[in-house]
Image: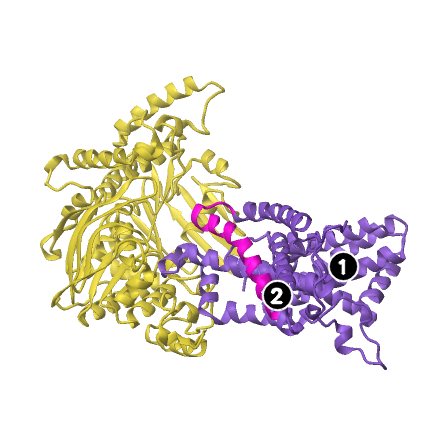
Chain colours: A yellow, B purple
């Protein structure tokens, strides 16, 4: 062990952006043939570190050693030459090229494409057999599911003979089954002696697949430990710097009367693709209905329709009163007046005006309420003092209502939105991705607030792509796939595997053939969307 | 702190831009063999050292305040209204019709009537581009600039075929009735002992412009509508989420913008010419863009920038009158100021920002 040189060794890497120290004196050793996890909260500096390793940024100080040799990596060409491959969170594929064309792009052997393509076809076939990385080489990338597109990215790196593979939050867009498959591929790669660096914020993934894990906090490496010798609780503490509760305490729900009835909701988007295909459910007071699903299966559209900024057909009744789904009286303002609060999925694009101060944001969407008016003008003094109170109750830091929303951290921005929506005391609260990009410490607080609201007898519709979150909070779980609800489960009667299959549109247990069944459904889904490209 | 303080952004950036423009202008003047120092002295003498100079400076500034505010209001909704020229032209038509066809008993009432007419006509001219932008996504920059040409053609037609008195060679409306003549600064402030503002066109409309600054400030930062306009300007997706109708806000913001631009015509048609002439706007609609940019879309900034451009206009006229510097060169100087304060804003801001950051770091260290 000690006589082999590390595949990658970073020594004293520092990088500052202006006055912000993104990386501070970071040293790390990654041994060959291992999977090394790097975990940390958003903004901890993980991506900066990897960008330095891949030649996107130049470190202010520090040295990089690849296989024991000091290496300068001024650009990504140099990184590739050093045998480093990177799979980005957002794929860098040409959508209307085939898999083969994407793989050779930038690595063509000569002016003529044909020999390169033929060679790549052979290599791809071999890689597919070796690692279980099978993709149809002649399929245009746009027809592939997200999981397959990710495989193309991995193939690209391997085709360039990468020995070290960096994956940046690779499971963010995958169904649990696809993530499992990815992990099996990573396992194979490790067995063949490849070195893998896995960047993630999911503790479960770290525990499941890595050999060693490094924890980053505020630009610094706080610890590197063997995965077998640690546990999620300890890792969470290392990430946050204090003790955190990973489990939410909650009593069983005591559902009351039905508050929201949704029947046969349908929505066709601007490209002519049907995004909601007959959604029906009931939501009762005092319960949380969790909507699970991989991003992009209609959950966003569902929230937007109910929140009043996307038109749809079907029936929605709130406390027995029908709500208009298009035309006048169907906007967000009308929904708020009717008693539907909404914490949107994307707080920076929707929930907040980033250039507005916290106090201005504290009435965003409710700014027409009589209480916020004083004659013809807005009652800014009252809004400001109320905002200060809300910020204190929701532990927003710093509790300064005059600060712009952009100057708060993700978690505190989310608390500003939550405070605004919850303090209005709505009958129904729509919540999308409540803890996306929120640090662990704030997640704890946000989950408790959601449970508290439920216990106060409010009806809550929770949409999240994090299955753990769905399990932790929901009293009932509905799974969406391709614009439909595939089924509803009691969280105590189901497990990740069953939900994972539902999330891929597979309703009956396929047993051994799970992957084939999933692929078939995902392909159907992509084909349904084809007209918009034509 | 990754930005420089707000005061530096608001004060130092325009100041440096101005200095750069002045420096370059000086070089240009040197190049044609005149003395920049003399030229500058002449400009200051002509525009600021005499009350009649101020009368001209403030007259021009009045125009620029209105058009600058017009651009600002639209800009808060992230709309780039470069149709101020056309909106002011059509606003002039409103002023002319109201002054000519309604028998006003007193100038004060006529001022109110003409202001309403000018605003209404200007707003109307902005309505079609606004509607096209809001409903059809036709880009407002393209449509408003097109509407400038249509406005010029329309005015031409109306003056020549409808308003021009029979037998008159000049394509202009008849002179407005005496009861609609607005008091100039001379009428208001000059006494036997102190003959101030003699012959200068500056008039009571300047105070209307100051009131407009105040009104725009209240609108943007104190009303619900202003809150919604700014919200839409920052993020359309967030505005939709909050139940703010982008269509409605785009149309309303453009109506207000067009109305403000239209108001400029009160100053030119009613306050100065006392009749409607061709091309009375003299490019003030476009100057408004520079004024708004330099004034950071804030009424106080717009006011100050408008005074500056008023000075440049009046000072430039003085130069043309007293030196061999040709009229075209004065346009070059004005263009340089616009270029530096408006278009090349970031060229000055970025080095300044770096300077500030460097100093900030040294202080902390």
Give the crowd class for mark 1: few <14, some 14-19, many >=20 residues within 10 Å.
many
**Secondary structure found at label 2:** loop
Q: Can residue B119 be seen in this snapshot?
A: yes
Per the image, the residue denoted by label 1 is B313
- Which residue does the image show at 62% across and 62% down from the upper left? B101
Choose top left, top right, bottom left or bottom right for residue B249. Answer: bottom left
Q: Is residue A382 left or right of B60 when viewed as pictured? A: left
Q: What secondary structure do most residues of the magenta stretch adopt?
A: helix
- Which residue does the image show at 53% across and 52% down from the upper left? A61
Q: In which quarter of the image is the N terminus of chain B?
A: bottom right
Q: Which of marks 1 and 2 is in front?
A: 2
- Which residue does the image show at 43% across and 29% down from the upper left? A105
Compared to A384, does A345 lie above or below? above
Residue B102 tag number: 2
The residue segment tinted magenta is B112-139
Give the x, y percent position of residue A277: 21, 44
Query: Which residue is outermost to the bottom?
Result: B193
Please tell me which residue lies in front, A71 or A204: A204
Please tell me which residue lies in front, A272 or A142: A272
Give the x, y percent position of residue A307: 29, 58
Q: Distance between the residues labelled 1 and 2?
A: 34 Å
The answer to if A342 sits in the magenta stretch is no
Residue B286 tag number: none
- Reading the chain from its start, which is encountered first: label 1 or label 2? 2
Subunit that carries the residue with mark 1 = B
């Amino acid at each position: 062990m000690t006589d082999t040189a590390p595949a990658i060794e970073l020594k004293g890497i520092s990088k500052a952006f202006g006055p912000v120290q993104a990386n501070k004196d970071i040293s790390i050793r990654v041994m060959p043939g291992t999977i090394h996890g790097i975990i940390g909260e958003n903004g901890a500096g993980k991506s900066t570190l990897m960008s330095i390793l891949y030649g996107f940024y130049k470190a202010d100080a520090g040295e990089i050693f690849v296989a024991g040799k000091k290496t300068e990596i001024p650009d990504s060409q140099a990184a590739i030459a050093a045998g480093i491959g990177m799979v980005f969170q957002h794929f860098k594929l040409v959508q209307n090229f085939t898999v083969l064309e994407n793989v050779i792009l930038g690595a063509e052997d000569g002016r003529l494409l044909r020999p390169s393509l033929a060679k790549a076809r052979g290599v791809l076939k071999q890689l597919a057999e070796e690692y279980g990385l099978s993709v149809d080489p002649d399929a245009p990338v746009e027809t592939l599911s997200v999981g397959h597109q990710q495989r193309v990215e991995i193939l690209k790196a391997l085709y360039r003979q990468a020995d070290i593979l960096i994956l940046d939050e690779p499971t963010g867009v995958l169904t649990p089954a696809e993530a499992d498959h990815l992990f099996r591929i990573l396992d194979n790669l490790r067995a063949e002696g490849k070195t893998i660096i896995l960047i993630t914020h999911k503790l479960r993934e770290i525990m499941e697949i890595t050999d060693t894990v490094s924890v980053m906090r505020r630009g610094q490496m706080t610890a590197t430990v063997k995965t077998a010798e640690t546990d999620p609780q300890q890792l969470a503490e290392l990430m946050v710097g204090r003790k955190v509760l990973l489990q939410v305490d909650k009593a069983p729900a005591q559902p009351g009367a039905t508050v929201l009835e949704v029947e046969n909701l349908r929505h066709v988007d601007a490209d002519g693709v049907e995004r909601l295909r007959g959604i029906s459910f009931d939501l009762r007071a005092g319960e949380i209905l969790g909507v699970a699903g991989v991003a992009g299966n209609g959950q966003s559209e569902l929230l937007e329709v109910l929140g009043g900024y996307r038109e749809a057909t079907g029936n929605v009744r709130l406390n027995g009163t029908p709500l208009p789904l298009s035309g006048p009286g169907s906007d967000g303002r009308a929904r708020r007046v009717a008693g539907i609060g909404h914490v949107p999925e994307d707080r920076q694009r929707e929930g907040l005006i980033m250039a507005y101060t916290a106090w201005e944001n504290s009435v965003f969407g409710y700014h027409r309420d009589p209480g916020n008016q004083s004659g013809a003008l807005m009652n800014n003094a009252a809004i400001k003092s109320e905002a200060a109170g809300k910020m204190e109750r929701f532990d927003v830091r710093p509790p300064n209502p005059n600060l712009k929303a952009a100057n708060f951290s993700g978690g505190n921005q989310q608390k500003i939105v939550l405070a605004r929506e919850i303090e209005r005391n709505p009958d129904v609260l729509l919540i999308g991705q409540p803890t996306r990009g929120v640090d662990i410490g704030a997640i704890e607080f946000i989950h408790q607030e959601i449970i508290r609201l439920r216990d106060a007898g409010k009806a809550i519709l929770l949409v999240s792509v994090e299955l753990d979150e769905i399990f932790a909070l929901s009293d009932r779980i509905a799974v969406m796939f391709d614009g439909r609800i595939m089924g509803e489960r009691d969280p105590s009667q189901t497990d990740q595997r069953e939900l994972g299959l539902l999330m891929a549109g597979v309703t009956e247990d396929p047993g051994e053939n799970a992957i084939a069944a999933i692929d078939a459904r995902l392909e159907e889904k992509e084909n349904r969307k084809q007209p918009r490209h034509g | 702190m990754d930005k420089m303080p707000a005061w530096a952004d608001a004060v130092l950036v325009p100041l440096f831009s101005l200095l750069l423009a002045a420096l370059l202008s000086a070089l240009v003047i040197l190049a044609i063999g005149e003395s920049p120092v003399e030229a500058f002295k002449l400009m200051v003498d002509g525009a600021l050292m005499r009350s009649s100079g101020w009368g001209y400076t403030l007259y021009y500034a009045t125009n620029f305040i209105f058009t600058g505010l017009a651009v600002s209001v639209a800009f808060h909704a992230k709309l780039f209204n470069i149709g101020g020229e056309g909106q002011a032209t059509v606003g002039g038509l409103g002023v002319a019709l109201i002054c000519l066809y309604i028998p006003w008993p007193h100038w004060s009432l006529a001022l109110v009537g003409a202001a309403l007419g000018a605003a209404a006509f200007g707003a109307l001219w902005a309505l079609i581009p606004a509607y096209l932008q809001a409903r059809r996504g036709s880009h407002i920059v393209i449509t408003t600039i097109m509407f400038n040409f249509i406005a010029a053609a329309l005015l031409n037609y109306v003056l020549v075929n409808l308003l021009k008195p029979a037998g008159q060679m000049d394509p202009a409306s008849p002179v407005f009735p005496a009861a609609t003549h607005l008091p100039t600064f001379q009428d208001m402030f000059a006494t036997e002992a102190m003959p101030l503002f003699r012959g200068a066109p500056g008039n009571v409309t300047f105070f209307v412009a100051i009131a407009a600054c105040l009104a725009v400030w209240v609108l943007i930062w104190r009303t619900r509508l202003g809150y919604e306009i700014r919200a839409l300007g920052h993020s359309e997706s967030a505005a939709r989420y909050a139940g703010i109708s982008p269509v409605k806000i785009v149309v309303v913001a453009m109506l207000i913008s067009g109305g403000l631009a239209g108001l400029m015509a009160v100053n030119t048609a009613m306050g100065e010419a006392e009749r409607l002439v061709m091309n009375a706007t003299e490019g003030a609609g476009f100057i408004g863009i520079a004024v708004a940019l330099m004034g950071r879309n804030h009424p106080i900034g717009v006011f100050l920038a408008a005074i500056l451009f008023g000075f440049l206009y009046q000072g430039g006229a003085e130069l043309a009158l007293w030196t061999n510097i040709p009229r075209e060169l004065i346009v070059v100087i004005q263009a340089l100021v616009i270029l530096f304060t408006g278009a090349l804003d970031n060229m000055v801001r970025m080095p300044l920002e770096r300077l500030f950051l460097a100093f900030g770091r040294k202080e902390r260290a």
